Image (cartoon, rainbow, N blue to C red):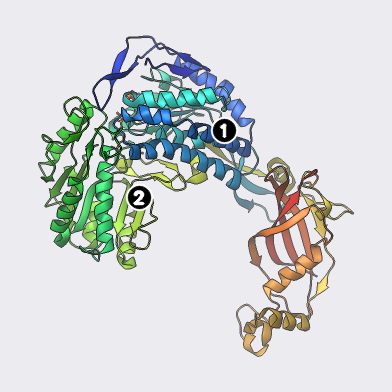
């Protein structure tokens, strides 16, 4: 299989000499790559000229729909990827993380795009900021997709997940992607890109794939582009030092090595559920993907007195891990990605041995099921013990990117935190404790050095998603050594691909520009009640001003006894004497809400299908018996949900007869569309 690059809408064979990529399992050549011959300036230009505009024409909902179709398409065709991926050393369980996990990430972004983003081409970020006394000048932040290209440079270990977890937020944000898989596993990413291209789901120019070296690509970057890099710290630094990155202020996201820790709590001695969970998780993280995971546990911290028990339990568990041909169902751990990687891991273990003793595993002797141990890049799990971790340096700094972990003891939680933070910034740490006080000490002791913390105990043991699994909903990244970047984290991930702009102007202007009504902008008041409007016909700013209603003491008494809410402030003049907020007996806030509904509702059957909830409710002025209220209801925003109905967000203000604001909230209704 000779790997071509997918650029400018077609597959192009590179120039230069072909070189073989070898199977991690058999050592046989499984694919060939070559470098050179691609005009990288034109590749970026195609993304910016063709892919970008096509994506930006779509709304978030349309892009989300596209991601969902793509995820479904890939899901039905993933078997071929599985077969190919075994050659990288991945077992079936590893493939679940890489292939199914990648497709799952597309599904999550598709769903978040529909549920959490507007059906618009830009995002509103935060609330309206009043910038003037009279209210005629306000501010709001908006986010629009960058007009450049997202360059994704990926590590070898997750050829599918790595590509898809970066692709999903970029496409959802409206930015085209040039992806560059790591060469050694590029044949899997290449097969994935073939499927994506064949599907025809993404617009032309939305995804291009450069197999092999990136040539002069960095020379052509601009300030509208984003580089998202995953790989070693050395490569990250090399790329970040490229003069164009500094000159053009190219946004650069880096995910690098990490010496992640698992910390056994002081309460979690042998025999406790947390001890078992810890041993299981450390062993799993050492052996999944043969330990070639950026999130794998490299340092297993335990109270010093439990270290012998930890080593004993881990050794027992690791001894039961079947190593061999990853295509076999019974094999739990395949080889590392290649012979060079094995040499690299062993060299790093040698370096670690200056500070730690090898307590489990012999690199020279590994029992391999169904494969040739000489031809494949097999390694046993290797467990080390560092007796003096406070003085050691390498165990906190040197990442052996394979099935390798070092156990180290600590005395007291402060020391545990000090040791964990010696990683100088990690992607993740997991804590195994059933003691919330110990967990809080650790969380606040190590939080600044970690991108993600997983607190595991008996209560979540069955359902927890694992130390090593980044979830698309949660941020993945870490400070310092881990690169200082972050990916995923739900819709936060889109922000890398969008420019935040502070927008200042009049309420009328900003309402029209953003499609979100702001108080102070003109209201459209018509004879027909706005609840008579179908979704399509309802204009933003359409308002209804109600009649007045006076609140009586009988109303308050009735409401109190009817609902059972006899809180003293509604029931007793005496009890409110000297109260900091209430001048005397006051109406229930919920009574005001109910009266407000009674004042603005148009009761007959019509396009308003349901009241869907309230947001941002604030009671601002207590009201006493005898006072009157009235309501303003204004259509603030609209978001279609499907072909039948859409969500309308109404700005509601309950006012006193004198026009003071008594309460504000946003009311959500579902409004029918025509023909539904
Ligand atoms: P790597 O050698 O740094 O390579 C990473 C990527 O950079 C590959 O696609 C590589 O392409 C590319 N690259 C290398 N030199 C380049 C250059 N001069 N210009 C442009 N691209 C260049 O890392 P790796 O061996 O693939 O991955 C293992 C490392 O990644 C480990 O240290 C691991 O901790 C880290 N990692 C981190 C995360 C995370 O999320 N933080 C995730 C996974 C892995 P070629 O393959 O063609 O050289």
Q: Are marks 1 and 2 in contact (CB under 8 Å)?
A: no
Q: What is the x, y in percent for residue 161?
A: 41, 35
Decide: few, some or many residues near mark 1? Use Cα within 10 Å; few <14, some 14-19, many ≥20.
many
Q: What is the x, y in percent for residue 410?
A: 18, 58
Indicate which quadrant contains ligand 1: top left
Q: Is residue 438 left or right of residue 225?
A: left
Rendered residue at 83%/69% (across/down): 548
Decide: few, some or many residues near mark 2? Use Cα within 10 Å; few <14, some 14-19, many ≥20.
some
Q: Is residue 578 above or below residue 521?
A: below
Q: Nearer the viewer, residue 565 or 674?
A: 674
Q: Which residue is mark 2?
A: 466
Rendered residue at 72%/47% (across/down): 645
Q: Which of pointers 1 and 2 lies earlier in the amino acid sequence?
A: 1
Inspect this view and state whether residue 242 appears: no
Q: Quadrant of residue 267?
A: bottom left
Which numbered mark, 1 or 2, is in the foreground of this view? 2
Q: Quadrant of residue 122?
A: top right
Q: Which residue is mark 1?
A: 174
Quadrant the N terminus occupies: top left
Q: Is residue 105 left or right of residue 560?
A: left
Quadrant the C terminus occupies: top right
Work out how far the residue at label 1 is from the one at label 2, CA to CA, in angstroms: 31 Å
């Amino acid at each position: 299989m000779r790997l071509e690059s997918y650029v400018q809408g077609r597959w192009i064979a590179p120039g230069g000499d072909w070189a073989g990529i070898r199977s991690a399992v058999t050592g046989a050549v499984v694919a060939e790559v070559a470098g050179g011959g691609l005009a990288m300036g034109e590749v970026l230009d195609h993304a910016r000229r063709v892919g970008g505009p096509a994506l930006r024409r779509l709304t978030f909902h349309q892009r989300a729909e596209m991601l969902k179709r793509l995820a479904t398409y890939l899901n039905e065709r993933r078997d071929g990827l599985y077969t190919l991926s075994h050659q990288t050393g991945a077992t079936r369980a590893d493939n679940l993380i890489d292939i199914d996990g990648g497709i799952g990430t597309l599904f999550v972004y598709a769903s978040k795009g529909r549920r959490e983003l507007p059906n618009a081409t830009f995002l509103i970020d935060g609330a309206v900021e009043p910038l003037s006394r009279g209210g005629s000048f306000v501010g709001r932040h908006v986010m629009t997709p960058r007009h450049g290209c997202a360059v994704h440079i990926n590590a070898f270990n997750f050829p599918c997940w790595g590509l898809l977890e970066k692709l999903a937020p970029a496409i959802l944000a409206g930015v085209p992607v040039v992806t560059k898989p790591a060469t050694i596993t590029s044949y899997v990413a290449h097969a994935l890109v073939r499927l994506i291209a064949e599907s025809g789901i993404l617009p032309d120019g939305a995804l291009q794939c450069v197999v092999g070296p990136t040539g002069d690509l960095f020379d052509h970057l601009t300030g509208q582009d984003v580089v998202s890099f995953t790989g070693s710290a050395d490569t990250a630094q090399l790329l970040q030092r490229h003069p164009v990155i500094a000159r053009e202020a190219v946004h650069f996201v880096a995910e690098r090595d990490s010496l992640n820790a698992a910390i056994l709590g002081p309460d979690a001695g042998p025999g406790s559920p947390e001890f078992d969970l810890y041993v299981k998780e450390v062993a799993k993280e050492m052996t999944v993907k043969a330990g070639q995971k950026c999130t794998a546990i490299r340092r297993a911290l335990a109270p010093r007195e439990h270290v012998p028990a930890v080593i004993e339990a881990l050794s027992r568990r690791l001894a039961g891990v079947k190593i061999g041909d990853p295509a076999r169902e019974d094999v739990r751990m395949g080889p590392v990605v290649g012979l060079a990687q094995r040499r690299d891991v062993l060299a790093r273990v040698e370096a670690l041995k200056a500070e730690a003793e090898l307590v489990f595993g012999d690199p020279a002797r590994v029992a391999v099921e169904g494969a040739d141990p000489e031809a494949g890049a097999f390694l046993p799990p290797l467990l080390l013990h560092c007796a003096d971790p406070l003085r050691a340096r390498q165990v906190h700094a040197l990442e052996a990117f394979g099935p390798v972990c070092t156990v180290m003891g600590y005395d007291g939680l402060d020391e545990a935190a000090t040791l964990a933070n010696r990683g100088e910034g990690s992607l993740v740490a997991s804590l195994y404790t059933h003691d919330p006080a110990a967990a809080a000490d650790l969380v606040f002791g190590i939080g600044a050095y970690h991108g993600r913390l997983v607190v595991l105990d008996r209560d979540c043991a069955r359902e927890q998603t694992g130390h090593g699994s980044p979830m698309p909903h949660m941020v993945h990244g870490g400070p310092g050594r881990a690169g200082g970047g972050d990916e995923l984290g739900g819709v936060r991930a889109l922000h890398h691909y969008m420019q935040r702009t502070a927008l200042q102007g009049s309420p009328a202007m900003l309402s029209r520009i953003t499609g979100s009504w702001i108080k102070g902008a003109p209201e459209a008041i018509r004879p027909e009640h706005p609840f008579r409007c179908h979704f399509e016909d309802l204009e933003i700013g359409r308002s209804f001003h109600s009649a007045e209603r006076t609140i009586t003491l009988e109303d308050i008494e009735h409401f109190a006894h009817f609902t059972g809410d006899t809180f003293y402030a509604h029931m007793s003049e005496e009890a409110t004497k000297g109260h900091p907020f209430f001048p005397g007996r006051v109406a229930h806030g919920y009574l005001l809400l109910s009266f407000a509904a009674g004042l603005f509702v148009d009761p007959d059957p019509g396009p308003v299908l349901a009241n869907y909830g309230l947001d941002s409710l604030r009671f601002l002025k207590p009201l006493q018996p005898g006072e009157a209220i009235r309501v303003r209801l204004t259509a603030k925003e609209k978001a279609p949900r499907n072909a039948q109905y859409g969500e309308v967000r109404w700005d509601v203000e309950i006012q006193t007869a004198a026009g003071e604001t008594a309460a504000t909230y946003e009311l959500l209704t579902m409004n029918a569309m025509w023909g539904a």
